Amino acid sequence: MNKPLITLPADYIDWLKNLKQRIRGARQRSILAASEDQIRLYHDIGREILERRNQEGWGAKVVSLGSNLLPNYLDFIRQFRNMRFIEYAISFYQKIIDVRAH
């Protein structure tokens, strides 16, 4: 008397496959959305720093000081502690300007 524990509906496996695809799709869309927001953030940081350099005379020491102080206020943002991140943000913004100009 070996009875199956449960009888699955005929379309159950297809439903699971579809569910799996939907979950994967949602995960991919959320990753892309997060990446898009991060790219916009880098663009905005680069633009704001360059504008302040041009309008207010900010130099490398002012920017470096900010990259050291910001993590004290937002401890989850370790990347800002690295001056290279700020330089990358500026470079990214400048490249976007170059691409738009051509």
Image (cartoon, helix red, strand yellow):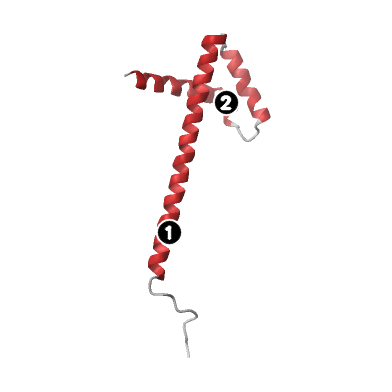
* Vertical position of residue 21 compared to residue 70: above or below: below
* Picture coordinates of residue 33, whole percent (x, y): 46, 40
Would residue 63 be found to the left or right of residue 16 on screen?
Answer: right
**Label 2 residue SS:** loop
- Residue 79 placement, left or right of 32: right
Label 2: how many Cα within 10 Å (few below 14, some 14–19, many 20+): few
Residue that carries the numbered disc 1 in the rendered image: 20
Secondary structure under tag 1 reads helix
x, y (%) of residue 29? 44, 45
For badge 2, the amino acid type reads Asn
Q: Residues within 10 Å of mark 1 (few under 14, many from 20)?
A: few
Q: Quadrant of residue 97?
A: top left
Q: Is residue 69 above or below residue 54?
A: below
Q: Position of residue 69 (x, y in %)?
A: 66, 23
- What percent of the width, then of the height, locates residue 93? 45, 22
Which residue is outermost to the right?
A: 72
What quarter of the picture does the C terminus occupy?
top left
Above or below 9: residue 99: above
Question: Of the residues shown, which amino acid type is indicated by label 1?
Answer: Lys
* Residue at image mark 2: 82
- The structure residue drawn at horizontal position 57% and vertical position 10%, both measured from the top left corner, is 56
Residue name at image x 39 percent, y 62 percent:
17
